[in-house]
Image (cartoon, rainbow, N blue to C red):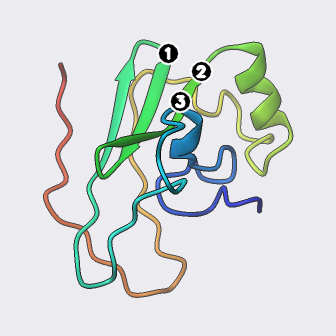
Amino acid sequence: MNGNRTIASLYDLIPANGLEFNPHLPAKKYVNGYDHWNRARIVVKGKKVAHYLNGIKVVEYERDTQMWRALVAYSKYKDWPNFGEYEKGNILLQDHGNEVEFKNIKIKEL
């Protein structure tokens, strides 16, 4: 799994790592405890995508590239035609059977 199934990661493809984009940070991710909310943001500009957790960029990738297709080809999504290539679609919120809560989910076109 390599940490790619943890908070703010691109599920099963890229693990979240804030140190990659902010080397001065003391940890890969700032995760609030179970009694506080975490803030996640995903910004998509064309084919470029960035994930933020509590204000820190933790993942960045570009869809429709050789690197993107290689990531997908070696993942459980390899049999899904054009996985991640669509400009519009649905979002998926995961829980893996654990209790989880979401609030203030917004999708904005900028």
Q: Amino acid at mark 3?
A: Glu
Q: Mark 3 falls on what kind of element?
A: strand
| Rendering coords of residue 6 (x, y %) | 57, 63
Label 3 sits on residue: 60
**CA separation, marks 3 and 1?**
11 Å
The x and y percentages for residue 86 are: 50, 24
The residue identified by callout 2 is 63
Residue lying at 71% horizontally and 32% vertically, measured from the top left: 81
State if disc 1 and disc 3 touch (CB < 8 Å).
no
Identity of the amino acid at label 1? Lys
56 lies left or right of 17: left
Circle 2: element type: loop
Please tell me whether residue 16 is drawn above or below residue 64 in the rendered image: below
Residue at 43%, 54% (x, y): give it.
Answer: 92
User: Which residue has dot 1 on it?
Assistant: 47
Of marks 1 and 2, which one's residue comes earlier in the chain?
1
Closer-to-camera residue (9/55): 55
